[in-house]
Amino acid sequence: MSVARERLVSGVRTLCGEPPDAPLADGGLPSSLIFEVLCDVESSLLRDLDLGTMNRRVASEDIYLNEEQENFPFPNFDFHSPSYVYLQTDPATNIWWPVEIVEHSSLGEATAQGKLAVAFSGSPPIGYFSWMPDGQQVLRVWYERAGNDDPLLADSTDIGNLYDEYLKNQAAAQCREFLKMEVGNVLKARIVKSERQWQKFVNRGTQRGLGAKAPAYRRYRQRAPGIDRTRFFVP
C-alpha cells in the first residue's frame, strides 16, 4: 500500500528540520509548497514509467457474472483501459480462458462465430459480452490504471510504496534548497542510490507487477499475434 501524501509532507518537513508552517519570507516552509513539490516530483516519476514499453500501473478486478447477465458496470474508478481479460467457467478449477477485447461494433461478429470477446464503452465504463453467462462464471479483467489529474493530500501516491521514500527524499532536497540549507551528504547518498534503483525498475521488463500496454484492435479479426487460443491460461 502506498503512503498517503500527507504523511510524506510530514516526512519532508522533518528532513528539513521541522520549520514552521509559515511563508518562506518568515523563515517557515508552507505545507502547500511541500505538497506542490511532491506532486511535481511524482509527475516526473510517472512520466518515466509512461516512457517504458511495459505498463507498471496495472491492476485486476474479478467480476462475478449472473445468469443471463448482458453487461456489467466496471466498479473501479481508476479504470483507464483493459489490458487482458480471462474467463473462469468452473469455480472448482483454476483454468482461465483468454477473452479478446474488441470494439463494441464487433461483438455481434464474435457472437456469430461463437468466440469469447468483451467490449468496453462509456464513462464510467460498461462491459459487454459476446456470450450469455450461466451464473457460475468469473471474469478477471486486468486493466491500466488512470493517472490522477487532481491529486489529493489524503490520497496515496501513484508511485508505489517501494519508491515513496525516493519521492520524499527528492522533495526534501528541493525544499531544503528553498530554505537555503545544505542538502547534506547522507540525503544526497540516499537520493543517488534510490535513483539507480529507480532507473533499473523503469527499464526492466521481467518482474512481477508488469503488464504489456494494451493493444488496440479495431476489428475482431485483427487478433494479437502469437496467441494460441487452444491453450489454457492461468493469469
Image (cartoon, rainbow, N blue to C red):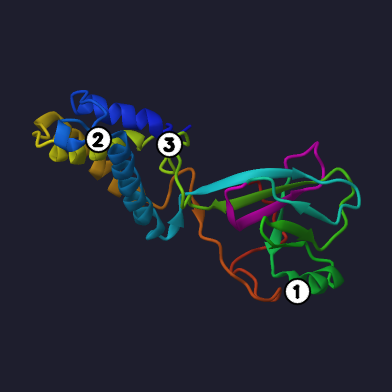
* Mark 2 vs 1, N-terminal side: 1
The residue sitting at 10% across, 31% down in the picture is 184
Helix, strand or loop at label 1? It is helix
Q: Nearer the viewer, residue 198 or 87?
A: 198
- Kindly report which numbered mark, 2 or 1, lies closer to the viewer in this rendering: 2
User: Disc 3 designates what residue?
Assistant: 153
In the picture of the structure, the residue carrying the numbered disc 2 is 169
Closest to the camera, between mark 3 and mark 1, is 3
Give the mark, 2 or 3, whose residue is nearer the N terminus: 3
Vertical position of residue 89 compared to residue 165: above or below: below
- For mark 1, what is the residue? 105
Q: Which amino acid is tagged 2?
A: Asn
The residue sitting at 86% across, 43% down in the picture is 136
Q: Local crowd at mark 3 within 10 Å, few (<14), some, or many (≥20)?
A: some
Q: Does residue 122 appear in the picture of this structure? A: yes
State how far apart marks 3 and 1 are (Cα). Answer: 41 Å
| Crowdedness near tag 2: few (<14), some (14–19) or many (≥20) residues, C-alpha within 10 Å | many
Residues at badges 3 and 1 in contact (C-beta under 8 Å)? Answer: no
Give the side of residue 219 with respect to residue 45, left or right. right
Answer yes or no: is residue 203 visible.
no
* Residue situated in front as seen by the camera: 224 or 72: 72
Q: Secondary structure at mark 3?
A: loop
Q: Nearer the viewer, mark 2 or mark 3?
A: 3
Q: On the rendered structure, is 7 left or right of 23?
A: right
Q: Where residue 47 sits: x, y (%)? A: 36, 56
Magenta span contains residue 93? yes
Q: Which residues are magenta?
A: 77-94
Where is residue 93 drawn, in percent x and y?
77, 39
Horizontal side, residue 40 vs residue 213: left or right: left
